[in-house]
Amino acid sequence: MTRIRPTAFAVVVAGSMLLGGVVGAVAYGASTVAALAASPSPAASPAAPTSNEDATHEAGETAAQEAAENNGTAHHGGGPGRPHAGAPNEDPAHEAAESAEREAQENAAKAAAPIATPTPGT
């Protein structure tokens, strides 16, 4: 009788571990399937960047800038450490096509947050 007790205990422990493993796998599998079913399909990749082919724009552009626009590596509009980050387009051709309301918005934004020019070494 003394040998039956430890053996029965070991069977009970092994059985509960096995049952716990099965229950855990089923719960994990069900949550994974639910997550996969609920996730949206990936969106289509955005279109490749296009360069500005306007004749006025092209006249003031270097060959390197044009090549960068054509191969999709051009970075327009500034960024960290670039002095024109967020600056409105003040090109005369752009201004001619802009409404007075939009120009007023740009001027108000410029007055509210002047563009800081980075200093070398900072």
Image (cartoon, rainbow, N blue to C red):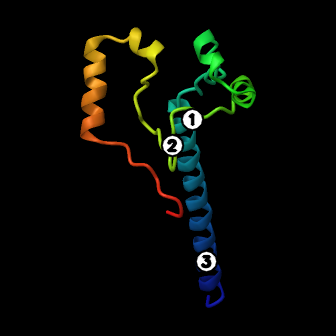
Q: Which residue is mark 2?
A: 79
Q: Nearer the viewer, residue 43 or 21?
A: 43
Q: Quadrant of the N terminus?
A: bottom right
Q: Which residue is mark 1?
A: 36
Cβ atoms under marks 3 and 2 closer than 8 Å = no
Q: Which residue is mark 3?
A: 8
**Who's the residue at 71% across and 24% down the image?**
66
**Who's the residue at 42% across and 24% down the image?**
90
State which quadrant residue 54 falls in: top right
Kind of element beneath mark 2: loop
As drawn, 57 above or below 107: above
Q: Nearer the viewer, residue 75 or 122?
A: 122
Let me know if residue 54 appears in the view: no
State which quadrant residue 7 falls in: bottom right
Q: Nearer the viewer, residue 1 or 48?
A: 48
Kind of element beneath mark 1: helix
